[in-house]
């Protein structure tokens, strides 16, 4: 039963329910003592609201209601619609309710609030909350909660920090939906990557490794040939869903914005540059929408740790940085859609329209192209066959789980390769860092070089290139060659991580914007001077600094020709693009810059 199922017991926060005994009412600002086995606050994940904050919620429209023992306040797989604060009694958080794997993972008492990032984003709950004993609580609509998060800064900071930490905890606890499939299946890998890139808690059941997998499938009338499948809440069964179908199950908004609804700013790509443009644009009053083909965060979201980003002296994971940016964007009202793969850009009636792979469209007076770039594929024999199973182009916990306690290799000499090597060395006995060149610091930040040279589990092999990958279903060994001597050798590794340079995501723009010889978008004077036959329109002798050959279309981050491939520079370019858009709007009569 959800928090809204017993509306007869709901009342204004200062009132009394029909089921309460006169004289027994607990005032909003007073709470009973927490249960002795209550889960401790973990790094700010489970703070207790103060009486003043609870009174503020009451004044802001929170309703008070009772709950009974055994009542379900949140249900796994159902949309979160209310922010709940316990006043009296206690509740337990359960994963996999009703299944053989059912497990109680949290106990909360008075002063605690329920929910995590899905609550703020209007998504489905990743766990079930059941009343352990009867009590009272406050309920507040999600829309009202979002308003308070922006208006009441202390309260907002407390809630946002708690939600972020809770999501990090849940990702590692096996809550959420369940993916069942073969570890060698490309579709299984796709679903797991989509979940991991979007920071969605889930459980993975491997047909080859989990002995109970066949029995679990039998319970739902399925066979291994029907996998991969997604199970959630004992009710939802999706057979090899597409990313968009899985996103819809979780409650991610449908692709696109109606084409007759023209936003001030449409951001295509949700990496650091796109997130920065969306946050700064919306905070400056521009109606803003942002879309991405896979997930928010881009390549940055796959970084295990970023230690040279301003303001985080102890470092921060790429996923953690991205989650904070996404919450910030939603706080300012940015409409975010994932997945939404852009396939075309055209001009229409004084604005621009982006067409997506599913046929939907979105329109904006100004566009920021921030589709980023992807790591180039390694072309050695045997590699393509093992991609998605034991050859990877990201290094996150998702890939680490597949490696086990086995040696691995990393190919690349940039910061991403260095960060991956150090991250993997935390879990595996040996990491071989294979460099085509001879100098580790030629394209890698000094702080990473110093850590790698001191790390006992990282072996640096200069002048080394992969010539062949060996293994039937998974990687067993690599043949490598010293590119100075020509000497070849065979090295035993069970996983390969590749970071060998980037190619831009600009295929959808080849007939629309001038690109350089590598496919990156030309901007500013370079766009004006380009001899590309692609048509262009400009109201000035030359585009603005980050403006493309189309007036009002800007590019930022890795997708832009000549950009510095760093998170901080991408964020700066995203912010700069908004300032230039304001200048362009002023010139076109939209208002002052």
Image: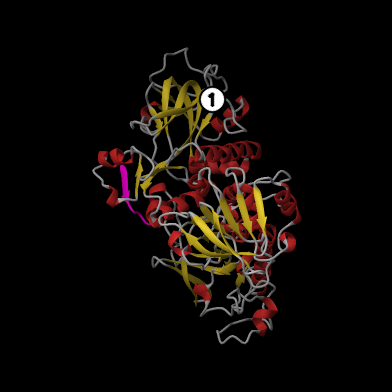
Q: Is residue 449 left or right of residue 237?
A: right
Magenta includes 255?
Answer: no
Tally of marks: 1
In magenta segment, residue 241? yes
Q: Is residue 508 above or below residue 238?
A: below
Identify the residue shown where x is 58% and y is 43%: 427
Whether residue 415 is visible, yes or no, is yes
Answer above or below: position of 112 versus 25.
Answer: below
Residue indicated by mark 1: 39
The foreground one among 195 and 57 is: 195
Is 387 or 135 nearer to us in this picture?
387
Residue 392 appears anywhere in the view: no
Q: Nearer the viewer, residue 82 or 543?
A: 543
Q: Quadrant of residue 9?
A: top left
In the rendered image, the vertical position of residue 29 relative to residue 1, given as above or below: above
In percent of width and height, residue 130 lies at 41, 27
- What crowding class fits label 1: few (fewer than 14 Cα within 10 Å), some (14-19), or many (20 or more)? some
- The residue shown at (48%, 43%) is 118
Q: Residue at x 67, y 74 (%)?
A: 587
Tell me the quadrant of the picture where the C terminus can be found.
bottom right
Residue 28: x, y in percent?
54, 23
Instruction: Residue 98: give x, y in percent of width and height.
Output: 33, 31
Magenta residues (range): 235-242
Tell me the residue at 62%/46% (across/down): 425
Q: Residue furthest left?
A: 221
**Tag 1's secondary structure?**
loop
Tell me the quarter of the image containing the N terminus: top left
Give the image location of residue 443, x and y in percent. 71, 63
């Amino acid at each position: 039963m959800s928090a809204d199922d017993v509306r007869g017991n709901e009342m204004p926060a200062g009132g009394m329910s029909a089921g309460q005994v006169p004289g027994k009412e607990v005032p909003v600002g007073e709470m009973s003592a927490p249960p002795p086995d209550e889960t401790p606050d973990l790094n700010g994940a489970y703070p207790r609201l103060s009486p003043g904050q609870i009174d503020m919620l009451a004044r802001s429209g929170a309703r008070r209601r009772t709950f009974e023992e055994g009542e379900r306040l949140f249900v796994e797989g159902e949309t979160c619609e209310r922010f709940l604060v316990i006043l009296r009694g206690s509740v337990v958080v359960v994963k996999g309710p009703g299944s053989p794997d059912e497990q109680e993972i949290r106990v909360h008492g008075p002063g605690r609030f329920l929910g995590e990032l899905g609550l703020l984003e209007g998504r489905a709950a990743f766990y079930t909350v059941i009343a352990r004993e009867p009590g009272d609580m406050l309920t507040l609509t999600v829309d009202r909660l979002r308003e308070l998060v922006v208006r009441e800064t202390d309260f907002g900071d407390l809630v946002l920090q708690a939600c972020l930490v809770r999501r990090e905890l849940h990702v590692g606890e096996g809550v959420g939906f369940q993916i069942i499939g073969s570890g060698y299946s490309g579709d299984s890998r796709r679903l797991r990557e989509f979940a991991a890139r979007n920071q969605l808690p889930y459980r993975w059941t491997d047909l080859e490794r989990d002995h109970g997998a066949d029995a679990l499938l039998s319970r739902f009338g399925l066979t291994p040939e029907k996998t991969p499948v997604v199970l959630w809440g004992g009710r939802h069964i999706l057979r090899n869903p597409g990313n968009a179908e899985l996103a819809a199950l979780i409650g991610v908004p449908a692709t696109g914005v109606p084409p007759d609804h023209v936003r001030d700013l449409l951001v295509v790509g949700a990496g650091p540059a796109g997130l920065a443009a969306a946050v700064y644009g919306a905070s400056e009053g521009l109606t803003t929408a942002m879309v991405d083909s896979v997930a928010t965060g881009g390549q940055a979201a796959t970084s295990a740790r970023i230690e040279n980003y301003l303001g985080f002296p102890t470092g921060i994971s790429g996923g953690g940085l991205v989650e904070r940016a996404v919450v910030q964007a939603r706080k300012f009202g940015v409409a975010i859609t994932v997945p939404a793969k852009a396939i075309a850009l055209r001009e229409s009636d004084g604005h621009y329209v982006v067409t997506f792979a599913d046929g939907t469209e979105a329109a904006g007076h100004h566009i920021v192209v921030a589709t980023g770039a992807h790591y180039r594929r390694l072309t050695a024999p045997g590699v393509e066959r093992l991609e998605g199973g034991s050859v990877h182009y990201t290094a996150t916990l998702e890939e680490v789980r597949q490696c086990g306690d086995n040696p691995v290799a990393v190919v690349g000499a940039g910061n991403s390769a260095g960060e991956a090597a150090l991250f993997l060395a935390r879990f595996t006995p040996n990491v071989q860092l294979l460099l085509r060149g001879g100098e580790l610091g030629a394209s890698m930040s000094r702080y990473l070089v110093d850590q790698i040279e001191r790390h006992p589990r990282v072996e640096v092999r200069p002048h080394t290139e992969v010539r062949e990958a060996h293994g039937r279903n998974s990687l067993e060994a690599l043949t490598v060659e010293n590119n100075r001597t020509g000497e070849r050798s065979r090295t035993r590794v069970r996983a390969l991580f590749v970071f060998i340079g980037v190619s831009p995501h600009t295929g959808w723009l080849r007939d629309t914007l001038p690109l350089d010889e590598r496919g990156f978008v030309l901007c500013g004077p370079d766009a004006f001077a380009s001899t590309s036959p692609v048509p262009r329109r400009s109201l000035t002798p030359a585009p603005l600094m980050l403006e493309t050959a189309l007036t009002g279309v800007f590019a930022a981050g890795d997708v832009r020709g000549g950009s510095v491939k760093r998170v901080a520079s991408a964020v700066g370019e995203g912010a700069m693009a908004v300032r230039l858009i304001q200048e362009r709007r002023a010139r076109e009569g939209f208002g002052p810059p």
